[in-house]
């Protein structure tokens, strides 16, 4: 009578599956317990908007995972914003959702990210975890990530990132310098 263990060792695909399962089960809890947030955003956008993709690229370049979800219509996009509690006064073109897993002694959090919020503000958000519904850059101001100023375009003033609550209350979260696209040739 033979033991099933040698049979498992002869099947590379089974061994790979077991190895992936062990690694996943060991590393995931450590990451969560260490309080290391997973930097992932789920972003909802209108099918006709290209600046949303440019903003997502800015966030990806800063080390974030971004999943883009295209809504079928403007009405569907507004419904999504209503469902997530985005006040009308801070709305922009795209809406992101950032889920922060609980840490030791902490609680899970969900934040809404509305519009062209810079990656630096997202980093501060996950570090400080303020008691707000989310962050927003209302409208689509020039110089924000995804709306960078082109070569030869006059400088724009700094832009404001607002923290907001679902009741519409806002406060300044930070001010950021307008961004400029690199000139051709990287200069």
Image (spheres, rainbow, N blue to C red):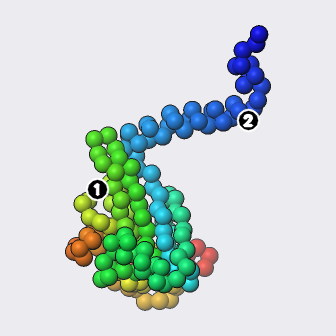
Image spot of residue 80 (x, y percent): 43, 74
The residue positioned 27% from the left and 71% from the top of the image is: 166
Say above or below: 185 vs 11.
below
Counting other residues with Cα less than 10 Å from the Cα at mark 2, is it few (<14), some (14-19), or many (20 or more)? few
Task: Tell me the CA gap for discs 1 and 2.
Answer: 43 Å
Quick one: 183 or 142, which is closer to the camera? Answer: 142
For disc 1, the neighbor class at 10 Å (few under 14, some 14 to 19, many from 20) is few
Q: Nearer the viewer, mark 1 or mark 2?
A: 2
* Position in image of residue 116 (x %, y %): 42, 75
Query: For this view, does 14 lie left or right of residue 158?
Result: right
Residue annotated with mark 2: 13
| Residue drawn at (35%, 47%) of the image | 102
Task: Tell me the quarter of the image containing the C terminus.
Answer: bottom right
Quarter-wise, where is residue 83 in the image?
A: bottom left
The label number, if any, that marks residue 128 in the structure image: 1
| Dots 1, 2 in contact, CB < 8 A | no
Confirm whether residue 12 shows in the render: yes
Q: In percent of the image, x 39 and y 49: which residue is there? A: 101
In the picture provided, is 158 more to the left or to the right than 116?
left
Q: Residue furthest top?
A: 1
Q: Which mark is residue 103?
A: none
Q: Residue at x 42, y 64 (%)?
A: 97
Picture coordinates of residue 130, whole percent (x, y): 26, 59
């Amino acid at each position: 009578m033979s033991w099933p263990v040698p049979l498992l060792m002869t099947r590379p695909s089974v061994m790979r599956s077991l190895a992936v399962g062990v690694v996943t089960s060991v590393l995931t809890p450590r990451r969560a317990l260490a309080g290391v947030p997973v930097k992932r955003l789920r972003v909802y956008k209108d099918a006709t908007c290209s600046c949303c993709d440019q903003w997502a690229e800015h966030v990806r370049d800063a080390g974030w995972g971004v999943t883009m979800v295209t809504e079928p219509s403007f009405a569907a996009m507004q419904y999504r914003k209503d469902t997530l509690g985005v006040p009308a006064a801070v709305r922009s073109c795209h809406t992101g959702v950032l889920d922060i897993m609980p840490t030791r002694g902490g609680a899970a959090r969900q934040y809404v990210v509305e519009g062209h919020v810079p990656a630096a503000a997202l980093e501060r958000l996950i570090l400080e975890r303020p008691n707000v519904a989310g962050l927003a850059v209302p409208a689509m101001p020039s110089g924000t990530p995804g709306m960078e100023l082109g070569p030869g375009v006059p400088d724009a003033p700094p832009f404001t990132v607002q923290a907001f609550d679902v009741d519409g209350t806002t406060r300044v979260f930070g001010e950021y310098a307008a961004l400029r696209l690199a000139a051709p040739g990287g200069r």
